[in-house]
Image (cartoon, rainbow, N blue to C red):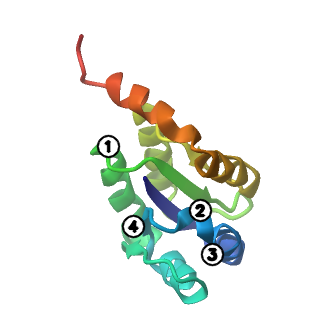
């Protein structure tokens, strides 16, 4: 399972605390993140994160490219809904790609917790069906 972490500046501490609490679930998974978020997670845990650029510098788009190539299974993106983001078009494009390719994306801690508990229970087998019906696959 391949999982990406993204957190806006005022959500980074919340992300680090969340990943630390569920480190046992994320162990053995292929993990990705935007720059600073990934660095902070690695400093607080034993997890290895494949880091991309900072979100405003293209990291959101790099993660979006993985989505478009069907290389991600889940994104945890803790957004700050009370702060305007200079790269809002990139964020919107990433969320659109997740909808197009059926990639679950949590944009708040409550949804993230539900999805991580589902991973822990083994409830992500439905991803096989998503692959079967992904765009561009004709029957």
| Up/down of 81 relative to 55, above or below | above
Q: Which residue is mark 3?
A: 9
Residue 4 position within the rendered picture, expressed as x and y whole percent measured from the top left: 47, 60
Crowding at mark 4 (Cα within 10 Å: few <14, some 14-19, many 20+): some
Helix, strand or loop status at disc 2: helix
Give the residue drawn at x 62%, y 52%. 120
| C-alpha distance separating marks 2 and 3 | 24 Å
Helix, strand or loop status at disc 1: loop
Which of 22 and 138 lies nearest the eye of the viewer? 22
Crowding at mark 1 (Cα within 10 Å: few <14, some 14-19, many 20+): some
State which tag comes first along the sequence, 2 or 3: 3
Q: Which residue is mark 4?
A: 59
Tell whether label 3 touches label 2 (CB within 8 Å). Answer: no
Give the foreground label among 4 and 1.
1
Q: Which residue is mark 2?
A: 25
Helix, strand or loop status at disc 4: helix
State which tag comes first along the sequence, 2 or 1: 2
State which tag comes first along the sequence, 2 or 4: 2
């Amino acid at each position: 399972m391949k999982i990406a972490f993204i957190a806006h500046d005022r959500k980074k501490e919340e992300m680090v605390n969340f990943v630390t609490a569920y480190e046992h679930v994320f162990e053995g998974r292929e993990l990705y993140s935007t720059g600073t978020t990934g660095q902070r997670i690695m400093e607080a845990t034993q997890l290895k994160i494949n880091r991309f650029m900072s979100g405003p510098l293209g990291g959101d788009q790099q993660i979006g490219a993985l989505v478009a190539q069907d290389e991600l299974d889940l994104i945890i993106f803790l957004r700050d809904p009370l702060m305007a983001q200079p790269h809002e078009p990139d964020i919107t494009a990433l969320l659109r790609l997740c909808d197009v390719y059926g990639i679950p994306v949590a944009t708040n801690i409550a949804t993230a917790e539900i999805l991580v508990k589902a991973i822990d229970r083994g409830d992500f087998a439905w991803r096989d069906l998503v692959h079967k019906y992904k765009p561009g696959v004709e029957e």
